[in-house]
Image (spheres, rainbow, N blue to C red):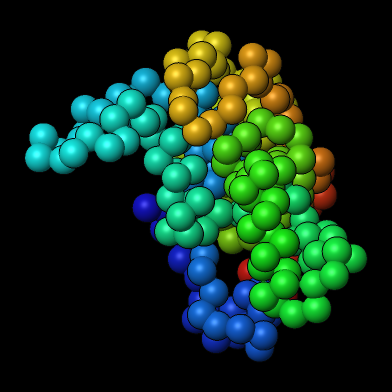
Amino acid sequence: YVGQEKLRPQAGWAPIAFALDWHRPPRHMNSTSYWYFHTDQWRYETIDADALLSPAGKGKNKGYSLADYNVAATRMGWLPSMPHWNANPLDLVNEAEKAGATDEAGIAKHVVGKLKSGELDVTFADPDDPVNWPRNLIVWRANLIGTSAKGHEYFLKHLLGAQNGVLQESGAGRNNKEVKWHENAPIGKLDLMVDINFRLNSTGAYSDVILPTATWYE
């Protein structure tokens, strides 16, 4: 918990931020999984997930890593992820329409076919593929870098490509069944970080653009 991330009532900004005039309710992704993959903390994982299994369980997923469970949950629709696919959804719809799809059922059939062939997959199955990286980050009402980021040095190394204090090479998390391993971890995934702030804090020191304000809601 970091107190500075408490927000004003959502009624004002949520309809715009989450397209509530189009559909509801939205399924938001949990930030823990998002940063676990996109800052490559999964590559350093030393916790054995098998040690957390119930002795009464059937052991169906024995040998899975924590990252593997995230991928499995995403594939089964339990865990929203952003981005979700390793392809732009707009491109998927265009491809389906060019292939003859005329309604939602036809588009869904096209997507299912690509999933079965392996051409399409969830991003967490290969988080270090450049096509799956986050490219832009806007920080608002949080001092992400230096205060609230859990695993701060991994943010610096893998997300920002900045000087960092990571003390070991990634490799402990290579034994995954559902996550593709790349020998060379990405360093610096973001192309642009924007900080909206009215204070002098550490996130601004790492941002490409700082938008100064008099209040959070200016």
Is 97 placed above or below 92 here?
Answer: below
Q: Can residue 56 be seen in this view?
A: yes
Horizontal and vertical percent position of residue 162: 71, 26
Horizontal and vertical percent position of residue 52: 21, 34
Q: Quadrant of residue 130?
A: top right
Who's the residue at 61% across and 83% down the image?
Answer: 23
Q: Can residue 156 be seen in this view?
A: no
Who's the residue at 54% across and 31% down the image?
Answer: 179
Horizontal and vertical percent position of residue 185: 65, 21
Q: Which of 61 and 14 is in front in this view?
A: 61
Q: Quadrant of the C terminus?
A: bottom right
Who's the residue at 64% across and 14% down the image?
Answer: 183
In this view, the residue farthest toward the left is 56
In this view, the residue farthest toward the top is 168
Is 19 placed above or below 96 here?
Answer: below
95 sits to left or right of 118:
right
Q: Which of 99 and 133 is in front in this view?
A: 99
Q: Quadrant of residue 182?
A: top right
Q: Which of 52 and 199 is in front in this view?
A: 52
Who's the residue at 64% across and 25% down the image?
Answer: 157
Horizontal and vertical percent position of residue 211: 79, 58
Total label count? 0
74 sits to left or right of 140:
left
